[in-house]
Amino acid sequence: MTRKKELFFDFKAALSHLKSDGDTLSPAALNALSGVNRQELAEFAETWVALPVERRRRASQMMVDLAEENFKNDFDLIFRYLLDDEDAAVRVHAIDGLWEDEDAALVKPLIGFLRSDPDPRVRAAAADSLGRFVLLAEYDRLPQGPSAQLVRDALLSTIRSGSEATPVRAHAIESLAYWSDEVMRNIITAAYDDEDEEMRASAVSAMGRSADTYWRQTAALELESPDPRMRFEAARAAGELENRAAVPRLIELMADADREVQGAAVTALGQIGGRPAREALTAAAQSDDEMVRTLADEALQELDFASNSDLLLLDIDSDGLALDDEEWDAVSEVDDKDSEE
């Protein structure tokens, strides 16, 4: 039996492959574009501008996927170049591809896209991307001067706009939710009361991102929603808000008909912890379902990591003894009651 020969591409060969007339694009060729320097970027640009728009769209999306699959793939210089592409889909891919780039120099270009790009898909992607800078500001990892204020003002302006498309406003709400402020509670409340289902789903997502326990009960109600997107967002919010009262329902949702809801429920149980969650995840880790099994393993690892951190920092009682899951459940119940009051 002959083994299929693996193709190897260097940078020049990758550019030649991009220019070829074939319908397919090789992941190996695009991998060869990872880590380009400034001089290589100029050569890439000469090739890129001559490509048909459909090939640019497919190539840019594939680079986003490759970067998500392997953290070693670095297309950041290329993605920054693609921000100026004439095609809206490519600009969206460029913004998405820079999801881990925390350079504050990106703030102004992203705000520019949010305020003035002619395509609502690009404006929505920019609103979503600005969320990480709100979070960085909350953690004091973004200068609290002009950059942080510019982001907040741009997102607030978008949310309050009477003419902006709903998806753009919805993404702006989700991004601004990391900002801990009374203004944010009012924005989330208004979005949750909106008749538009997309806006309501974004409100539930924002509840989780806010880390405000005020929203625990409201978000938990949507775990019963007939809309799978609402159940998905509610499950994620339950995990982010560490709502132990939601654990029984989340265990049920591990068998939900919607795969994304299943995954969100498994991940949320890993964030919440406690004995019932751990037992459910341990059983799920033996599942024949590969997705559920993999996510359950990851969730259990997160629980183990959190437990080790708790032993070192938090869970020592007055007698110097570590608190177990059952005792932590009792503590969490008190926290839940306090938040309800």
Image (cartoon, helix red, strand yellow):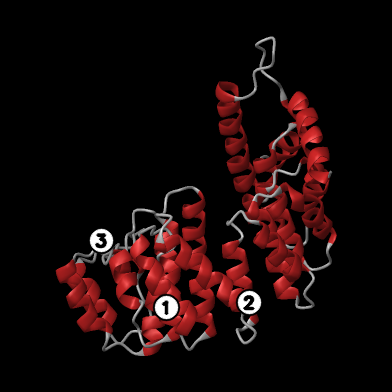
**Camera-side residue: 39 or 158?**
158
**Camera-side residue: 131 or 147?**
147
**Camera-side residue: 124 or 285?**
124
Which quarter of the image is occupied by the N terminus?
bottom left
Query: How far separated are the C-alphas under marks 2 and 1?
Result: 17 Å
> If you read the primary sequence from the N terminus, does the residue marked by circle 2 or circle 1 appear first?
1
The residue furthest top is 319
Q: Are marks 1 and 3 in contact (CB under 8 Å)?
A: no
Which residue does the image show at 38% across and 79% down from the upper left? Answer: 24
- Disc 1 target residue: 112
Q: Which mark is residue 160?
A: 2
Which residue does the image show at 43% across and 55% down from the upper left? Answer: 144
Is residue 155 visible in the rendered image? The answer is: yes
Disc 2 crowd, CA 10 A, few/some/many (<14, 14-19, 20+): few
Is residue 61 visible in the rendered image? The answer is: no
Horizontally, is 233 left or right of 16 in the view? right
Q: Quadrant of residue 103?
A: bottom left
Disc 1 crowd, CA 10 A, few/some/many (<14, 14-19, 20+): some
Please say if 93 is above or below 68.
Answer: below
- Disc 3 target residue: 35
Which residue does the image show at 51% across and 59% down from the upper left? Answer: 134
Q: Secondary structure at mark 2?
A: helix
Q: Quadrant of residue 181?
A: bottom right
Query: How far separated are the C-alphas under marks 3 and 2?
Result: 40 Å
Return the x and y of residue 341 as percentages of the image width and height. 84, 43
Q: Which mark is residue 145?
A: none
As shown in the figure, which amino acid type bears the numbered disc 3? Gly
Return the x and y of residue 113 as percentages of the image width and height. 44, 79
As shown in the figure, which amino acid type bears the numbered disc 1? Gly
Which residue does the image show at 52% across and 65% down from the upper left? Answer: 152
